[in-house]
Amino acid sequence: MDEKQFDEGYEPEAFDEVMSAEAEVKPADSVQAEMKPENGVAEPSVYRAQTQPAEERDTYAEPPVYNAPYNGGNAQYGGGNGQPPKAEPKKQMPWKRIGVAILVVVLIGASTFSIGYYQGQINISEAALNEKVNELLASNFNDQINQSVVAYLNSQDTLPETTSNDISKIYDLVSSSVVGITSQMTYYDFFNVARTADGSGSGVIIDQTDDLLYIVTNYHVVDGATDVSVDVSDGVMVTGTLVGYDEDTDIAVLSIQKSDVPELLLNTLNPIEVGDSDLIAVGELAVAIGNPLGYSNTLTSGVISAVDRTVQDDSDIKYIQTDAAINPGNSGGALVNSLGQLIGINTAKIADTEVEGMGFSIPSNTIMPIVDELIQNGYVARPFIGIGGVNIDEASSELYEIPVGVLIQYVYEGSPAETAGLQKNDLIIGVDDVTVYNMDDLTGYISAMKPGDQINLKILRDGDTKMVVSITLGN
C-alpha cells in the first residue's frame, strides 16, 4: 500500500479482498457459529452494514437481541426447521495470520511515515535551514566546537549570515576586555597660570602577569598626560601607568595593578583574544567597542570596507577601513571580527567629520610586535641606515639620464651608512633582491627588519659604477 492510499483514505473492501484471499474456506454453519457475540465477533448483518456505503445500510435489518428467548425456526441463523443450530467445535482464531497482517500494516505505515519525513526534511527551504544554523551558532557561540566550525566556514567563505543575536554574543565576549581611559594634562595659560584639561579614550586589555594588566591604546590619547585613570567597569577607576609608546604607529601601552581592582571585578577582566588581521576580507563583519564621548562600552557594527588603506601622510601604515561608527572617544578601542577576536585598534585621529561611514583601525598584525616590544623594553627599536635622500622618478630619470631610485643627499655622522662607506650622490637602485623606486620602498623594506640585521644595497656611483654595499642596521 503506497502513501497515496493513506492520503486518500482506507478502503475496507480492499482489505476484505486481501484477507479473504488468505483465509481458508469454512462451512457456512461454522462461520455462523464463529460470528456469534459469545465468540467476540459481530453478526453478519452488522458487518455488512459497516462495510456497505451509507446509502445502502438501511436495507439491512437491525441485529437481533441475543438476550431474548430463543424462538426457533430462524433460518437466518442456521436454525432450519425451527431447530437451534448444531453445535460445532470451537476453532482457534488464526492468530499467526492476523499477527502477520498487523505487522505488515505497521511496517508499511512506518515506511510511509519515514519516507514522508525525509522528503519533508529534503524539501526544507534554504532560508529555514539558514535560520536553524544561525540559531545553533547563536546558542553555542562560546563553545570551542562552534568557534572551530565558524573559523572553518570563514576560511571557506561560507560564513552564515550574522544576526543581531550573534552581535550580542560578541559583545558579551569582548566587553569585559575594553576599558575607558581618562587622561589629565596640565598647561599654562596666557598669564602663566597652570590649568588642567581632561581627555578621554578607550583601551583594550591585551596581556597580563601575576600583578599587572596591560592595556593597549592610541598614543594620542595619553600624549602629554600627567595623570592617567582607567575605568575598568561602570565608574570603577584605577591609576594607569604609561609603559611605553610608539609615536610613528600611534600605539601606547599602559599598565594597572591588579591589587587596585576589586577582587570580584578582577575575575571578569581578561585579555582579549587576538586574531590575524591578514585574513580579513572586504565585506566581513566588523564590530567596534569603545567609549565615544565618555559613554562606556558602546558597540557599533558594520563591515570591513577596505584593507591596506593608506590615510593622509601615514604612508608607512596600512589601515583597516570600516563603516562601523568610530567617534571621538573610540580611539584605542577594539575592532573585532565575528569570532570576537581583536583585528584592530580603532583611531579617531584621522576621522573626517565631513564624511560618514568611514572609520579606520590599526591592524592587529601591525600592533602586536610593537606591543610586545613596548612591554619588554619600554620602547620600540627601529632599524635605520642614516641617510637623507630624494626620489628620482621617471621624469627626472629621463631628464638626467640616470636610473630611477633614491639619490643620497647627505650621510649622518656616525651612522651605519657612514661606517659602510656610502657617499653623497650615490644612487640606491636596490636592496637585497628588491628593486628600489623611491624612499618608501627603501624604508618599508628596512622597517620589516631588526637592528643588527645586515642588508646589501645596490648603488650607482658617479653615474656609471655599480656597487654592492653591505650595511648592518643601526638602532
Image: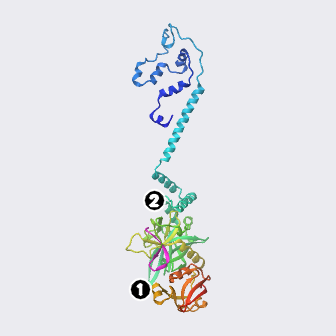
| Residue at the extreme top | 81
Residue 320 place in picture, x, y as percent: 48, 71
Q: Earlier in the sequence, mark 1 or mark 2?
A: 2
**To which residue does mark 2 refer?**
164
| SS type, badge 2 | helix
**To which residue does mark 1 refer?**
189
| SS type, badge 1 | loop
The residue under label 1 is which amino acid type? Answer: Asp
Residue 422 place in picture, x, y as percent: 57, 90
Mark 1 against mark 2, which lies toward the viewer?
2
Label 2: how many residues lie within 10 Å, few (<14), some (14-19) or many (20+)? few
Q: CA distance from mark 1 to mark 2?
A: 49 Å
Q: Toward the viewer: 441 or 86? A: 441
The residue under label 2 is which amino acid type? Answer: Ser
Q: Name the image quarter holding residue 155.
A: bottom right
Q: Is residue 60 above or below residue 367?
A: above
Say whether residue 385 is visible: no
Say whether residue 28 is visible: yes
